[in-house]
Image (tube, rainbow, N blue to C red):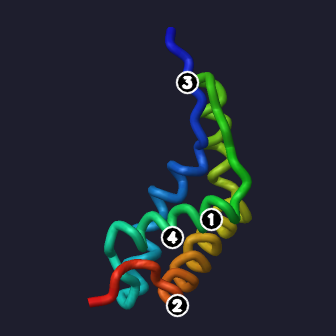
Amino acid sequence: MLLEMHNHMEDMVRDRAPAILNGMPSVCRCERCELDRFALALNKLPPKYVVTAEGKLYARVAQLQNQFDADVVRAITDAALMVEQNPRHEMD
């Protein structure tokens, strides 16, 4: 069995971001802004590294906690607003 280390928080942000950003039609969808939002959100959240199948299960259970979900939503929203106010892509 090949073991890999993975930050489960990345999955959480990738899974939750589309629904949150759909409610914010003014955000830029270019690759640079997408990656900036992703990085900013992850930097505001604690990492949740897993290695084993049991660790992945534990991380999935933790994501069901209300405060955990609220923290992810807030980090994504804050990151989207910050990038919207300070985009780093080329303006046409």
Q: Is residue 19 above or below residue 78?
A: above
- The residue lying furthest to the left in this view is 92
How far apart marks 3 and 2 lie (CA) works out to 37 Å
- The residue carrying mark 1 is 72
Secondary structure beneath dot 4 equals: helix
**Crowdedness near tag 4: few (<14), some (14–19) or many (≥20) residues, C-alpha within 10 Å:** many
- The residue carrying mark 2 is 85
Q: Residue at position x 63%, y 53% from top?
A: 64
Q: Is residue 41 left or right of residue 2?
A: right
Q: Is residue 65 left or right of residue 29?
A: right
Dot 3 amino acid type: Glu
- The residue carrying mark 4 is 37
How far apart marks 4 and 2 lie (CA) works out to 12 Å
Secondary structure beneath dot 3 equals: loop
Secondary structure beneath dot 1 equals: helix
Between discs 4 and 3, the one toward the N terminus? 3
Between discs 3 and 2, the one toward the N terminus? 3
- The residue carrying mark 3 is 4
Between discs 2 and 1, the one toward the N terminus? 1
Between discs 4 and 2, the one toward the N terminus? 4
Q: Is residue 19 left or right of residue 75?
A: left
Picture coordinates of residue 24, whole percent (x, y): 42, 86
